[in-house]
Amino acid sequence: MHKRIAALAATILFITTSSAQSDPSPNREWDRARAIAFALENNADLRAARLSIDLAESRLARTGIRSNPSVNIEYSSDFLFNDEGEHTLGVGFSQKFPLANRLKLAKAVSRVDIAKAKAEVRIQEIAIAQSINEIALELQVNDTRRASLGRLLSKSEEIASFIQSRVSFGEYSQLEANQATLEARSLAQEINQLSDERNHLVHALEPLLGLKAEKEMSFVEVKEIDLSDDSLRYDDSIFDRHPEFQLATLEAHSAEAEIALAESENWEDVTARIFWENERSVDEPNGLGTDRFIGVGLSIPLPLRKKGDLRVREQRIARDQSHRKAAAIKLRVQHEIEHARHEMEDLRKSIHSYRKEVIELAEQQLEETQAAHQKGLVSFVTLMDVQRQLLEIEHKHLDTLESFAQARQKLEIALLKSPGLSQ
């Protein structure tokens, strides 16, 4: 009874602990690094994928085990022929012994399979991290756009309020006041649409993190896109931990191990036998007599047909293919890093130049036009045109910022330096 209570308590504790780990407080605010680190522990697909490692380890445990010995029983009699009472009874044990270290070589193949399973899981982990990175980037761009539109909305509401306050004095018509209000409300509606899109993006993160459908989560707002790349430096050591490159290298090692195993299969098992035999036979003129024997036997197969040679040829091709695949992956990754870095450098220059030469001038132009409009020096239509021009310039600037952030994300993934992705 006490054992049952203890087992039940342990089960409840385990379930509670697991729930606490996989279901954090809904009020917790997530950022990119936290989301990736949590997903690597709790994503449902990753949990299932990690069982492939356990499966490979289980295969290793049963690989390389010598076959069980056999019991041999033999009996013969002359009862259908002379029926003189002659018979023979033999009991023996036999054991097969593999040659050429076949069992050890089979274990070597299984050990490489474990390493390959780990590399495949790592590839899936990076894919999950990349999916979270993409959503986090969309959230960041969304926040940046809403912040920019918020600044424009503040100016637009200021203009609309000023014009509305002057309608009663006859300085502006109600039509102009309504147009200014409409411009402000259009910006507000665009901000609301971006807020809805942000909520949808946050919900898209939940299954990647392994959260339950009813959970609500919030994601930290980042209104500035980082233009630096000080931590994103290339190092050849990246290929010591790059899972795609490592998997291709492991496939070459696996082929080498399979070659050695296939060559060992040209030598089949040697069978050793020990036996006891009791023989009852007629020996003239003494009649029936009994003879007993103990002996050993050895069966050595001749390697006339080398069945492993065909598999050796196949595995050599697989090995060469894996080496070429590893070289191709290395070249691709190097080009991805170089391309992303060049793209970032070009876009960074464009962003700095655009901010200094276009945006600052457009903002100054709007302020001066607004001041001139209040003094009656420019028309309402001119003021609205300048405001729309600034909005269009801001949108183009945000598109360039988004392209830079995407290039930075490509570089982070290529260098395996995404926040929250353990090295």
Image (cartoon, rainbow, N blue to C red):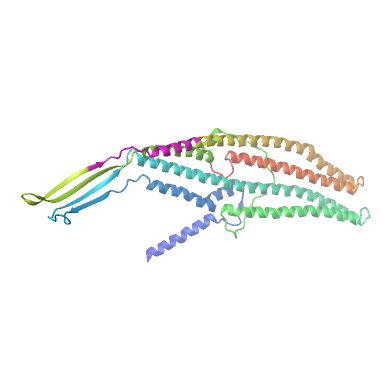
| Closer to us: 219 or 287 | 287
Vertical placement of residue 324 versus 386, above or below: above
Tell me if I can see residue 390 in this picture. Answer: yes
Name of the residue lying farthest toward the front: 81
Where does the image place residue 401, in percent across and percent down from the top left? 71, 42
Where does the image place residue 17, in percent across and percent down from the top left? 49, 57
Q: Is residue 412 magenta?
A: no
| Closer to us: 160 or 192 | 192
Q: Quadrant of residue 395?
A: top right
Where does the image place residue 231, in percent across and percent down from the top left? 61, 37
Where does the image place residue 351, in percent across and percent down from the top left? 73, 38
Residue segment shown in magenta = 297-320
Q: Tell me: 420 left or right of 384.
A: left
Name of the residue lying farthest toward the left: 285
Tell me if I can see residue 222 in this picture. Answer: no
Name of the residue lying farthest toward the right: 170
Q: Quadrant of residue 310?
A: top left
| Closer to us: 80 or 227 | 80
User: What residue appears at the point 78 percent right and 43 percent down from the top-left corner?
Assistant: 393
Name of the residue lying farthest toward the top: 236
Q: Quadrant of the N terminus?
A: bottom left
User: What residue appears at the point 84 percent right and 50 percent down from the top-left corner?
Assistant: 159
Q: Tell me: 312 left or right of 175.
A: left
